[in-house]
Amino acid sequence: MKHAGPEALDRLETLLRDLRTRAGLKEKSRGTFYRGGRAFLHFHEHGEDVYADARLRDDFERFPATTTADHARLLGLIDRALKADT
């Protein structure tokens, strides 16, 4: 599974825009987010499917990120993780 390229990230642009509004996240390069100087979220593609690797706890976990329903679930998990540390 390779890191998401420009075309895959284009399909995620709405999700990326939403992520950019989250306090505490910094987009170091397109589609790669850091939290407090530590890698937090990036994307992979496999065929037409896209996956997010998110460090919600200690290690990265992989989540589907292809559909708008996937995006909503992922944003909810990220929001809970960000809120837990405040």
Image: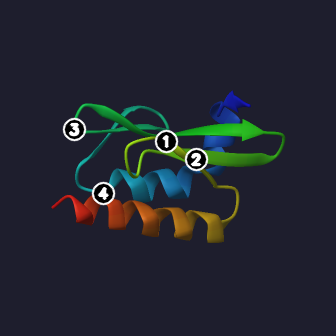
Q: Residue furthest front?
A: 58
Q: Earlier in the sequence, mark 2 or mark 1?
A: 2
Q: CA distance from mark 2 to mark 1?
A: 9 Å
- Which of these two is toward me, 48 or 41? 41
Amino acid carrying label 4: it is Arg
**Quick one: which residue is furthest to the left in this view?**
86
Q: Nearer the viewer, mark 3 or mark 1?
A: 1
Residue hosting label 1 = 60
Q: Comparing marks 2 and 1, which lies closer to the viewer? A: 1
Which residue position is annotated with label 4? Answer: 22
Q: Position of residue 9 (x, y in %)?
A: 61, 41
Q: Which mark is residue 36?
A: 3
Circle 2 crowding by C-alpha within 10 Å: few under 14, some 14–19, many from 20 = many
Q: Which residue is mark 2?
A: 52
User: At x 24% / y 31%, what residue is drawn?
Assistant: 37
Which quadrant of the rendered structure holds the N terminus? top right
Residue 26 placement, left or right of 65: left
Residue type beneath disc 1: Phe
Residue at left offset 25%, top offset 65%: 83
Q: For numbered disc 2, what is the local secondary structure?
A: strand
Name the residue: 38% across, 43% down.
58
